[in-house]
Amino acid sequence: MTRIGEPWRPGAVPERWDAVVIGSGIGGLAAAALLARHGKRRVLVLERHYTAGGFTHVFRRPGYEWDVGVHYIGGVHPGGALRRFFDDVTDGALEWADMGDVYDCVAMGGKRYDFPRGRGALEAEVTRRFPSERDAVHRYFELVEETVDVTRAFFQAKAMPALLAPLARPLARRRFAALAARTTREVLESLTANQRLIGVLTAQWGDYGLPPAASSFAIHALVAHHYFSGGSYPVGGAGRIAETILPVIAAAGGRVLINAEVGAIVLEGRRAVGVRMAKSGEVIRAPLVVSDAGVANTFGRLLPADLSAVSAIRADLGAAPTSTAHVALYVGLRGTAREIGLPRANLWVHPDEHHERTVAAAAAAPLAPGSAFISFPSAKDPDFERRHPGRATVEVAAFVPWTAFSRWEGTRWHKRDADYDAAKARLAAHLLGLLEAHVPEVRGRVEHAELSTPLSTHHFAAHPQGAIYGLAHDPGRFRRAWLRPRTPVRGLFLTGADVATAGVGGALMGAVMCASAILRRNLVQAIGRASQLRLTGQDPARSPSLSRAAP
């Protein structure tokens, strides 16, 4: 078992730090790295799991390894919008492998639809498949671009102090609010009545966890646009993300500790002054506490129950829906990805274009979901064959309701009853059947198949009800003004996906927003300028504009 981070031992770490980060998902690690690089902060990251990385970590079985949450990332090609932030928090050490001309393929109702990289290429392909909907397709792509443009003002305001937030492009923010208030289905049905077209355009709904009638159009547009430039995968596997961030934290005197569960945030008055460890009860002090534990855990479990400063937030949280839960089948194959002929592009499997009906059917029969997401990590990673010669991997994920597994909540990992094992076996057989039906090349090559359930998400990530994406990305999410890095508790900040959006990219941008708020500096602009200087062969360290805080 490969572990990232140092094991925590009671009494073995200094009591005082410049900042303490709770949780080592990409939001926590990136926030720590940004504070280290741009604020010269000495940061301690505390992770309850046996390895750092959150949903970027990998797990291994003899001859195999699988990622648990990184399947593809957009915008990390050279010069890409997200690449500059990954380069900053990893000091350029993280390499990316391009997935090729097609990053997603949709199997729907007996037909297949490719998603090629490049907005122009994708629009042309969709128009080719739906020639009578040319105008509707074009209006859709224009609206996605507009939504992404006005979204920047929305998130910029989140990182600013409350008194300055109204200055962040108010007209753009009002336009964003209008778009975010509508569901994806409402917006698309205002453009076309062709349900198959709507089904294809929203086939990636699993990337944010809500079908079109429930999701905000804002999250749909952000995710769709995120992949317009294609998809990429970390060279060396998803674990390389955490591995390349840790040295940046360590360079400023920071540390990342594992098996280090935080029991509570320590307050003096209305100010956070540190954390109390769950097992030993010892207090580690810092003037800054950053939580990557998610808003439900931060406000519901880590702060005192009688804290009036967050009572309104807790009340709103109680009414806020969470994202769906999921299962994942991890498949190990005999033979390399090249020998078998596995694609790099992901495969979205849907019985038809009626995604809401599919979700309802899965709620009624959770052990036989009709939709699935199939990913081929060993085909995406050019280094996989070196690490695991003669082997290949596939992952099959599907959304299921938490209620299908809630009866086993509170039972121990690997110590659950025969009914649980039978449910897992039935689900695994169903997902394996979907895989073999749509990727027949794997037949006769399966050496290992292992299923995770929502209880795994609950156990390892402490996500309430196994919610894979935290709070649901419905229209109401974007009206919650308190979903921002600053909290009513002085010295306590939030990072990660809950203050931004779903996915690794969203959690990374949550960290950028968090560090910007703490340092009172626009890191989006600062990192962007530094990236441009590097692309032109200049040294950012010699730029006077980057040596002082930006407004």
Image (tube, helix red, strand yellow):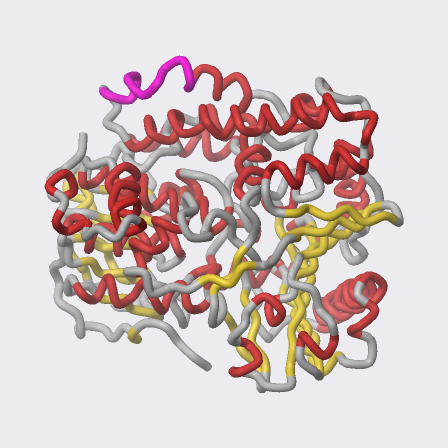
Q: Kindly tell me whether residue 426 is visible in this rendering.
A: no
Residue reaching furthest to the front? 536
In the rendered image, residue 534, in percent from the top left (x then y), is placed at: 27, 51
- Name the image quarter holding residue 6: bottom left
In the image: residue 168, left or right of residue 235 = left
Residue 539 highlighted magenta (yes or no): no
Could you tell me which residue is drawn at 25 percent across and 75 percent down?
9
In the image, is residue 139 above or below residue 48?
above
In the image: residue 474, left or right of residue 495 = right
Residue 166 highlighted magenta (yes or no): yes
Could you tell me which residue is drawn at 63 percent across and 71 percent down?
416
Magenta extent: 164-173
Count the numbered circles shown: 0
User: Could you say which is closer to the camera, residue 115 or residue 29?
Assistant: 115
In the rendered image, residue 524, in percent from the top left (x then y), is placed at: 30, 39
Residue reaching furthest to the right? 110
Q: Kindly tell me whether residue 185 is visible in this rendering.
A: yes
- Name the image quarter holding residue 382: bottom right
User: Could you say which is closer to the camera, residue 129 or residue 333?
Assistant: 129
Could you tell me which residue is drawn at 42 percent across and 38 percent down?
500
In the image, is residue 143 above or below residue 254?
above
User: Could you say which is closer to the camera, residue 255 or residue 528?
Assistant: 528
In the image: residue 108, left or right of residue 136 = right
Specify the quadrant that holds the C terminus: top left
Q: Which secondary structure is most common in the magenta stretch?
A: helix
In the rendered image, residue 334, in percent from the top left (x then y), is placed at: 71, 83
Could you tell me which residue is drawn at 53 percent across and 42 percent down?
226
In the rendered image, residue 49, in percent from the top left (x then y), is placed at: 41, 67
